[in-house]
């Protein structure tokens, strides 16, 4: 089966805006001029007035609120930047979908689950049988499947701010897991530009800050699940509790060594 058919959450959001696949909605939003009008972005205005949308009056009010939130996130990230950031149409859509998800997860979880399962039941039989029903457990992870250079790092910074706004749970640890030290340093520098409290993992410190929601940036190779880890390795039990985990290169996990990484990530979650 084509992988797109597994992306039910994405298809559900597309359905809300009257489309069946990404291409059509992206093509529609691409034609919208960047900018704001009456305290709303042109993207939001166009989506709310789009032909075929399945949004109630309350949903449209929610879109207005989401859009204002998104503008606040961008303003916060831009405070320490010389070159100000503006979201491209495809980035805006990714952030908007996350905003809808987190709001419904936090404030309408059971209604949201029911809506998702009703949507699954509307799909073709082969897809229904493969996917089955969504459960609360299925709502613990979000993945962004986007092209190289599409701004996933920036979107992750916004996701961090979105999480803090909705706070579906109080995190004991916040980790950003990377494949190597080079990427860890890049993320550290970018997070500093965005004003996000963060630090690189070092042997002298291993737990994430609690008070200011500090992000601990650590390579997957530094995490171990047995007591034989030495040097700068750290046992995953150091991060007990409720964890907010960001993962760079999250698609990795097929090769032998990478399968161990995937298992470690799952245990942390």
Image (tube, rainbow, N blue to C red):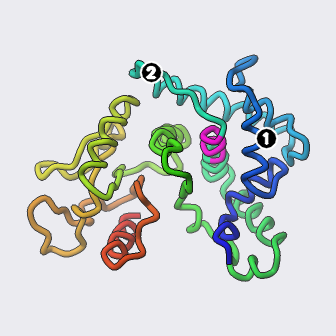
What is the magenta range? 90-97
Query: Closer to the camera, 115 or 253?
Result: 253
Return the x and y of residue 98 as percentages of the image width and height: 61, 47
Please tell me how many numbered marks the rendered image carries.
Answer: 2
Majority SS type along the magenta span: helix
Q: In which quarter of the image is residue 21?
A: bottom right
Name the quarter where the C terminus is drawn: bottom left
Return the x and y of residue 79 as percentages of the image width and height: 43, 20
Disc 2 marks which residue?
83
Mark 2 element type: loop
Query: Closer to the camera, 260 or 28?
Result: 28
Q: Which residue is drawn at 74% across and 77% down?
A: 127
Mark 1 element type: helix
* Of the image marks 2 and 1, the number of the one nearer the N terminus: 1
Q: Which residue is drawn at 76% across and 53% down?
A: 14
Side of 103 where 230 appears, left or right: left
Return the x and y of residue 65 as percentages of the image width and height: 69, 32
In this view, 221 is above or below 207: below
Q: Residues within 10 Å of mark 2 (few under 14, many from 20)?
A: few
Return the x and y of residue 117 as percentages of the image width and height: 75, 68
Query: Furthest-left residue in view?
Result: 231
Query: Closer to the camera, 80 or 166?
Result: 80
Residue 174 appearing in the image: yes
Q: Residue at x 32, y 75 (%)?
A: 260
Residue 245 appearing in the image: no
Q: Quadrant of residue 68?
A: top right
In this view, 168 is above or below 122: above
Disc 1 marks which residue?
28
């Amino acid at each position: 089966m084509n992988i797109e058919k597994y992306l039910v959450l994405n298809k559900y959001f597309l359905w809300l805006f009257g489309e069946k696949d990404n291409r059509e909605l992206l093509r529609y939003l691409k034609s919208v001029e960047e900018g704001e009008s009456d305290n709303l972005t042109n993207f939001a205005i166009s989506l709310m007035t789009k032909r075929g949308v399945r949004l109630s009056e309350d949903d449209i009010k929610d879109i207005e609120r989401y859009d204002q939130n998104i503008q606040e996130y961008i303003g916060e990230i831009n405070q320490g930047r010389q070159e100000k950031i503006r979201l491209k149409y495809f980035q805006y859509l990714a952030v908007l979908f996350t905003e809808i998800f987190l709001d419904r997860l936090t404030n309408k979880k059971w209604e949201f689950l029911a809506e998702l399962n009703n949507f699954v039941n509307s799909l073709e039989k082969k897809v229904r049988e493969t996917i089955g029903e969504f459960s609360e457990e299925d709502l613990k992870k979000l993945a962004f499947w986007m092209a190289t250079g599409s701004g996933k790092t920036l979107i992750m910074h916004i996701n961090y701010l979105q999480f803090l706004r909705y706070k579906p749970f109080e995190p004991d640890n916040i980790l950003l897991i990377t494949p190597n030290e080079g990427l860890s340093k890049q993320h550290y520098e970018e997070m500093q530009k965005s004003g996000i409290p963060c630090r690189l993992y070092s042997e002298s410190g291993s737990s994430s800050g609690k008070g200011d929601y500090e992000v601990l940036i650590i390579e997957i190779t530094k995490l171990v699940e047995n007591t034989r880890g030495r040097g700068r390795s750290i046992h995953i039990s150091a991060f007990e509790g409720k964890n907010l985990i960001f993962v760079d290169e999250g698609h990795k996990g097929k090769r032998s060594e990478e399968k161990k990484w995937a298992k470690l990530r799952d245990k942390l979650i």
